[in-house]
Image: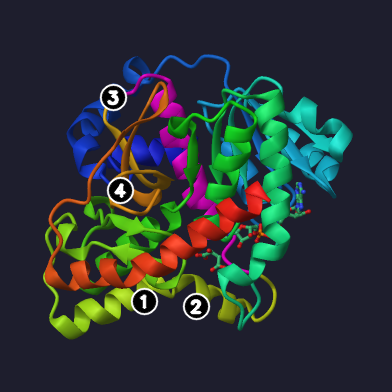
Amino acid sequence: MQLQQQRLSAGSSGCAGRRLAAPAVRRASSRARTMPVVEARKVAVLGAAGGIGQPLSLLLKMNKLVTELALYDIANVKGVAADLSHCNTPVKVTAYTGDAELEGALKGAELVVIPAGVPRKPGMTRDDLFNINAGIVKGLVSAAAKHCPNAIIEIISNPVNSTVPIASEVLKAAGVYNPKRLLGVTTLDVVRANTFVSEARGLDLKDVDVPVVGGHAGITILPLLSQATPSVTFSDAEREAMTKRIQEAGTEVVEAKAGAGSATLSMAYAAARMAESTLLGLAGEPSVFECAFVDSQAVPGSPFFASKVQLGPEGVSQVLGLGTLNDFEKAALDAMLPELKAQIQKGIDFARK
Ligand SMILES: NC(=O)c1ccc[n+]([C@@H]2O[C@H](COP(=O)([O-])OP(=O)(O)OC[C@H]3O[C@@H](n4cnc5c(N)ncnc54)[C@H](O)[C@@H]3O)[C@@H](O)[C@H]2O)c1
Ligand SMILES: O=C(O)C[C@H](O)C(=O)O
């Protein structure tokens, strides 16, 4: 609710917040009249007892667009749900654990958010998580294919560049793949880019919107600083340093946590923002945009790519192109592609074997 209030009044909705700025300011003065009509919306969080899952569930419990919050985890989820259910917001909280209860979590869900899986420790890459998380995502998406085949699925579990292709293959094999309904959550990259650029240039955060494209690991994370709103200028050295900071921001947190995991609170904030945008799109709100890692033809040869997408009643209603890149961004795009394609293919091969 708080997040939503902030979003509606700040006019910040997605990596293309600029498109919403004017209507959102109008909504702020007549919010009761212009809030989308809320139908029954069940949201399932798989991995809800984890470092991301718990604060994400709290934020969703505060969101007026959610009516039921189904929390699923292999451990400790009943306590999390009991705790959360005491918050006096209208969202109904239910808890499910173990394979036998997964169906209950998923039945009737319109949005399934998946932060299940292990996080990095210092010295690891996201790809080092593949061996454990690939199987977790495969299993959970198989269950979603069976129990809520029309739900929108948003994957947080790393490595996103591989787990999203795994999910697509699982859904294809089950005969229920709809590319408009599968998204890898890269919102945290946008959140970070907005924060760092605003800090560097002394800008009001609510005005800043930096699209981040590519994927979600190292050099595959490409902030398009040339397309930032408001327009910002950087020297070559500054642009390179800012790009690297955004690319390495996850590692910055992993190192600061020194073995206790990776980003959880900022990720929960980012995922809650992504979920809210998705629910706004489902509710028929026009002009809702976010960057996300989706089935895409934006870049030839890369079957998945993160770019700005429009969210609507069907999920992803439009995948936007990359716009005009400067020479630095063009070179960075060329440099990332072999790595991104290999990580996508690794996910596809795993799911097909
Ligand atoms: N996309 C992003 O931007 C982004 C950002 C931060 C973290 N992540 C990733 O999110 C994942 C979770 O991170 P975290 O810090 O919350 O980890 P965590 O270990 O704190 O929590 C993970 C939770 O998943 C649960 N889990 C494991 N297997 C499960 C299964 N089969 N079904 C249901 N639940 C299961 C665990 O019990 C645990 O509660 C990691 O893979 C991490 O790399 C992604
Ligand atoms: O860095 C990580 O391992 C977690 C996440 O992908 C992040 O960007 O914070």
Q: What's the residue type where badge 3 is placed?
A: Pro
* Alpha carbon distance from label 1 to label 2: 9 Å
Which is nearer the eye, 87 or 194? 194
Nearer the N terminus, badge 1 or badge 3?
1
**Residue at screen point 25% across, 80% down:** 240
Q: Is residue 93 above or below residue 130?
A: above
Q: Residue at x 53, y 48 (%)?
A: 165
- Residue 332 in the figure: left or right of residue 3: left
- The amino acid at mark 4 is Cys
Residue neighbourhood size for the residue with mark 2, other residues' Cα within 10 Å, grouped as few (<14), some (14–19), many (≥20): some
Query: What's the magenta region?
Result: 262-286
Q: Disc 1, disc 2: CB below 8 Å?
A: yes
Compare marks 3 and 4 and give the one earlier in the sequence. 4
Q: Residues within 10 Å of mark 3 (few under 14, many from 20)?
A: some
Q: Which residue is mark 4?
A: 15
Q: Which residue is mark 2?
A: 252
Q: Choose the circle earlier in sequence order: 1 or 2.
A: 1
Q: CA distance from mark 2 to mark 4?
A: 22 Å
Specify the label residue 286 is tagged with. 3
Between 62 and 130, the residue placed more toward the observer is: 130
Q: Is residue 116 magenta?
A: no
Earlier-in-chain disc, 4 versus 1:
4
Q: Which residue is mark 1?
A: 245
Which secondary structure, mark 3?
loop
Instruction: Look at the numbered disc 2 and give the secondary structure of its residue.
Output: helix
Q: Nearer the viewer, residue 161 or 223?
A: 161
